[in-house]
Amino acid sequence: TASLVFGGAVLWLSLSIPVGILSALRPRSIMDRITMTLVLIGISAHPVWIGLIFSYVFGYKLGLTPIAGYCNFFPGTVGAQCEGPVNWAYHLILPWCTFMILYAALYVRLIRANVMETMNEDYVRTARAKGASQRRVMVQHVLRNSMLPVVTILGMDLGLALGGAIFTEGIFNLPGLGHEIILAYARADLPLITGIVVFATVCVIVFN
């Protein structure tokens, strides 16, 4: 679960931050309209549907990635069928992409709104009036302040996701907390269910 969540977080932040900033710098442009359309699709599409489409196209039809399964990151694991960092990343490409789409769409919209709001603040206009370059204004004034809500929400999202990315783990047969809690519900294993819920709660508190 940690491999899935943190890998997906790196992907969705790497995508959403530049796209959100570019959309905010050119509001109502063609690029901004296309981005907002893709954001709406990303928010609306269910992870189960996205995962099945990715598995069918990239795994089954094109044969570029594994359809399911998990590899251990550390080589030499006892009883492991698949191991090593390369195989680990190779088996998680589709789960990462599936997991990150919803969050990337949400964060693009959030970053765009925050950057546009911050650019209208008095201190930004003052910095421009003093002759500061566009790069200096963006880096030292706009981004530093507009990213504060993003960091706050990121802590909550990481904590909640660590509690079990149920849909993604179920589609790709990953032995994570989401997969375990489904099995626990099926056999009415109350101690295991309680343990996962408590762990998710602790993760949210720690990351916040």
Image (cartoon, rainbow, N blue to C red):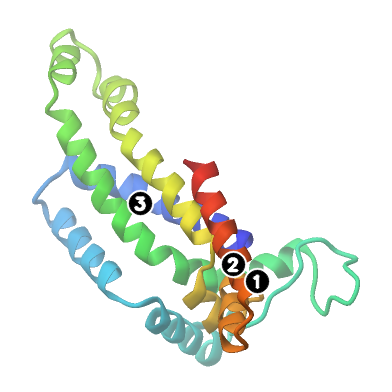
Residue beneath disc 1: 191
Q: Residue at x 79, y 65 (%)?
A: 84
What whole-number distance in Å separates the C-alpha atoms at marks 3 and 1?
38 Å
Q: Position of residue 61 (x, y in %)?
A: 51, 92
Residue 110 vertical placement versus 179 (above, below): above
Using a 10 Å C-alpha cutoff, classify the residue at mark 3 as few (fewer than 14 neighbours), some (14 to 19) or many (20 or more). Answer: many
Residue 60 vertical placement versus 126 (above, below): below
Residue beneath disc 3: 16
Where residue 194 is drawn, which disc sits there? 2
Is label 1 in a helix, a strand or a loop? Answer: helix
Q: Position of residue 42 (x, y in %)?
A: 30, 68
Q: Amino acid at mark 2?
A: Thr
Q: Is residue 98 left or right of residue 76?
A: left
Give the mark nearest the N terminus, 3 or 1.
Answer: 3
Residue 9 vertical placement versus 149 (above, below): below
Q: Residue at x 11, y 51 (%)?
A: 29
Using a 10 Å C-alpha cutoff, classify the residue at mark 2 as few (fewer than 14 neighbours), some (14 to 19) or many (20 or more). Answer: few
Q: Residue at x 18, y 66 (%)?
A: 37
Is label 3 in a helix, a strand or a loop? Answer: helix
| Residue 185 or residue 141, whichever sits in front | 185
Q: Amino acid at mark 1?
A: Pro
The answer to whether mark 1 and mark 2 are in CB contact below 8 A is: yes
| Residue 187 or residue 177, whichever sits in front | 187
Name which quarter of the figure residue 182 lies in. bottom right
Q: Amino acid at mark 3?
A: Ser
Quadrant location of the N terminus in the rendered image: bottom right
Q: Position of residue 64 (x, y in %)?
A: 58, 80
| Mark closer to the observer (3, 1) | 1
Q: Is residue 183 left or right of residue 161?
A: right
Q: Is residue 7 visible?
A: no
Q: Position of residue 82 (x, y in %)?
A: 79, 76
What whole-number distance in Å separates the C-alpha atoms at marks 3 and 2?
34 Å
